[in-house]
Image: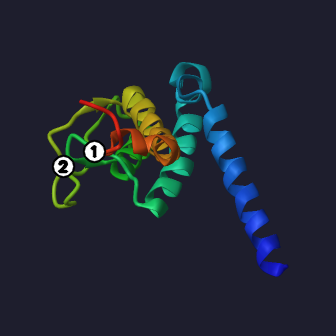
Amino acid sequence: MKKLINLTIAATAALTFTTSLHAMDEKKDCDVKANGIEKVIATANKYNAEAKKKGLEFRRLNVNNSDLIKSVEEAIKTGAKEVNPMHFKGKKKSKTKLETNYAAERACKFAITALTQDEEAKTTWRLAVPGDGYKY
């Protein structure tokens, strides 16, 4: 009985998290003009932490999403118009230079997308498997 209750609680939590991800409108939640850069970065931090726990963090242009978030936070503190995040190996700055607002939107979208793709993959992965009965 105890296992059944634990399973029910876990399923409810997973369904709530999945529903909240599907209910999110990435364009609205990551819009710097509408929400402000601080709120967008807070959203990015929240979902990127969850993505890192699952091993799903995005890396684009040799920059991890967490490094992009850190560089945007530093730019907010200093008032910089452009960010130059660290290379994913962490030894030097990358060649990537982005405008601060664009970098914040990008980090937010990458954090949310990592989790939504994970949820979508649970139901659609079978369509991409060779030998699934489809003729290519």
Q: Nearer the viewer, residue 1 or 46?
A: 1
For the point 34% across and 51% down, which residue is it? 67
Of residues 42 and 128, which is closer to you in this image? 128
Q: Is residue 32 left or right of residue 14?
A: left
The quadrant the N terminus occupies is: bottom right
Tag of residue 91: none
Quadrant in which the C terminus is drawn = top left
- Specify few, some or many for label 1: CA neighbours under 10 Å numbering under 14, 14-19, or 20 or more: few
Q: Is residue 37 left or right of residue 69?
A: right
**Gap in Å between the C-alphas at discs 1 and 2?**
41 Å
- As drawn, the label of residue 130 is 1
Q: Residue at x 37, y 33 (%)?
A: 103
Q: Secondary structure at mark 2?
A: loop
Q: Nearer the viewer, mark 1 or mark 2?
A: 1
Give the mark, 1 or 2, whose residue is nearer the N terminus: 2
Query: In the image, what residue occupies the spot 60% across and 27% down?
Result: 25
Amino acid under label 2?
Lys
Q: Position of residue 55 (x, y in %)?
A: 40, 60
Residue with the mark numbered 2: 93
Measured as percent of width and height from the top left, residue 105 is found at 44, 30
Residue 30 percent location from the top left of the image: 53, 29
Q: Residue furthest right?
A: 1
Farthest top residue in view: 33
Identify the secondary structure beneath mark 1: loop
Image x and y of residue 39, in percent: 59, 36
Count of numbered marks: 2
User: Given contact means CB atoms under 8 Å apart, are the residues at marks 1 and 2 in contact?
Assistant: no
In depth, the one of 83 and 31 nearer the eye is: 31
Please rate how many residues cluster around mark 2, counting C-alpha atoms within 10 Å: few if below 14, some from 14 to 19, many from 20.
some
Q: Is residue 130 above or below residue 30?
A: below
Q: Which amino acid type corresponds to the residue marked 1 in the rendered image?
A: Pro
Position of 106 relative to 131 (above/below) = above
